[in-house]
Image (cartoon, rainbow, N blue to C red):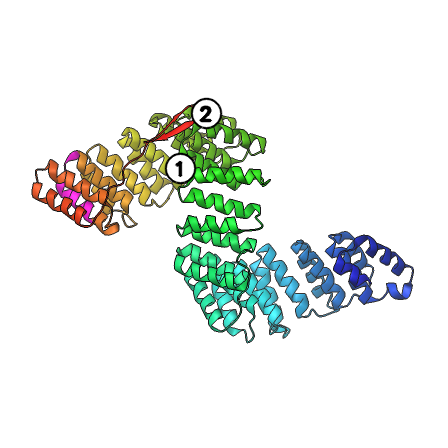
Amino acid sequence: MSLACAGLRALDFGKMVHGFIKKNDEIDSNLFVGSAMIELYSKCRMLDDALRVFEEYTQPDIVLWTTMITGFEQSGDAVEALSLFTRMVMLGRVCPDAITLVSVVSACGQLLNLKAGISVHGFAVKMGLYSGLSLSNAFLNLYAKTGCVNAASNLFKKMQEKDVISWGSLIACYAHNGAAKEALDVFSEMTHKRVEPNSVTVIGALQACEATCNLEEGKKIHEIAARKGFELDVLVCTALIDMYMNCGSPDEAVELFHRMTKKDAVCWAALLCGCVQNGMGGKSMGIFCNMLSSGIQPDAVVMAKILTACSELGILQQAFCLHGFVIKCGFSNNAFIGGSLIESYSKCCSLDNAIKVFEGINDRDIVIWSSMIAGYGMHGRGREALELFDQMVKNTTIRPNNVTFLSILSACSHVGLVKEGIELFNMMVHEYQLMPNSKHYGIMVDLLGRTGELDKAMGIINQMAVPGGPHVWGALLGACRIHQNTEMGEVAARNLFQLDPDHAGYYILLSNIYASDGKWDDMTKLRTLVKDKMLKKLSGQSRVEVRSEVTIS
């Protein structure tokens, strides 16, 4: 009866049964009955009552110990689970079995306590409890959660018996630890061995496709999910939406979303964030409104993303509305959202409101400072950006990071503060020992190039620790156009043609350099090449907001 109550989580009826048991000494002392009562209280999240029942037994057997340990572990109290296991081992009255260790290893996984997990692994080997499938899967899951890819891989190879849980754990381990190709290889091997994939293995494989932008493989896995009947499972759908969005196929993600019968907050967030990521700001706003109409409340991540969409659209009235919604939802003190608000107002040409948001945040982190510095830079107020950077460095304990230096260097570039920009770049590398990326180098090349310091700009490129990307060579090519340096412009153009051979703008920019230099034959050859390759330069667009209406021209 008590076991039935535990299975049904019928707490009130279970307490009545417990009361009856307490009146019968023979039943009350029965360890099997005690185990059932502990299970009942544990499943009903009444851990104090469960522990009270456990402590009533002076000589608990392994079943009683395991039930109590499992109760703590499954209720999310992993610390107490490990503490109770340690107590059991120290007493030495009973020996843990494989079932006990499964719960203990799961508790280690919850805490991401690899050291404790390795100790339990050694204990299991010593006690000869290592060979069971459930325990092996538990260790596999532990190593996956703690990022021990080699340990998980070696364990998997040694396992004589494997089930779909084993395969799923290894796939997830690879997918979550930067080994997406290996995750897809394991998924392929699993299907070739005719192991039926479940939703967990499919999700792991889709995450690997997302990480590698492997749309072709992602579509194949989508077909498998459809055949197996869990295509419209909420978790699988969310993984599919993430995959399609990251692989640049937002239309397929939107179509799948509309076919879903059940949608949770995570799924809505995946769709909205994906649309923002793909530059679909207007679509994101519509999704956000539909999300609210469906009764789904956005979390901080969604709010930050929709503010990013607002930034890209540049609609000030929407920024005001979203700011009000942020206050209403109680996100005003969230630093991540505060940074997004500052960025949104800055990009919507309302620096004064960005400053008000900044000044209204008492506990400013690096995101807030970097966003405000970037805001000043966007509006050509480089001196104010430098003053704010100086204030952050001298008056707070916050250390600038790569993003902060990107913001302040960009601010210097916009107003031609060459000396200050060079000093900040050197500070970044030598004082803060931060590794510049291609964007930092691109800004430095742009800064030096604008003032005609082309040799110094080339010197920056030659000392780069990372390969020069379009940001770097594009900045140099633009500077060569302004200062009519044909020879260096050709060097920049050759590198850009290798990086993106179908970008018409690079060819046209070089042809303009040739025209300025009077090299009409070279100019004609380039223009002919553009025509033969059927390349087209993308026309620029401007957004103008008038009375809450946005005109694109």
Q: Which corner quadrant of the image does residue 550 belong to? A: top left
Q: Is residue 473 above or below residue 553?
A: below
Where residue 380 appears, x then y in whole percent? Answer: 33, 27
Q: Which mark is residue 107?
A: none
**Label 2: how many residues lie within 10 Å, few (<14), some (14-19) or many (20+)?**
some
What segment is highlighted magenta in the picture?
483-494
Could you tell me which residue is drawn at 45 percent across and 58 percent down?
Answer: 208
Secondary structure mostly seen in the magenta stretch: helix
Q: Which mark is residue 353?
A: 2
Could you tell me which residue is drawn at 48 percent across and 38 percent down?
Answer: 286
Q: Which corner quadrant of the image does residue 421 belong to? A: top left
Which amino acid type is shown beneath numbered disc 2? Answer: Asn
Query: Viewed as shown, does residue 7 lie left or right of 360?
Result: right
| Residue under pointer 1 | 404
Q: CA distance from mark 2 to mark 1?
A: 21 Å
Query: Viewed as shown, does residue 234 lie left or right of 370?
Result: right
Residue 366 falls inside the magenta stretch: no
User: Quick one: SS at disc 1?
Assistant: helix
Where residue 171 appears, x then y in whole percent? Answer: 49, 63
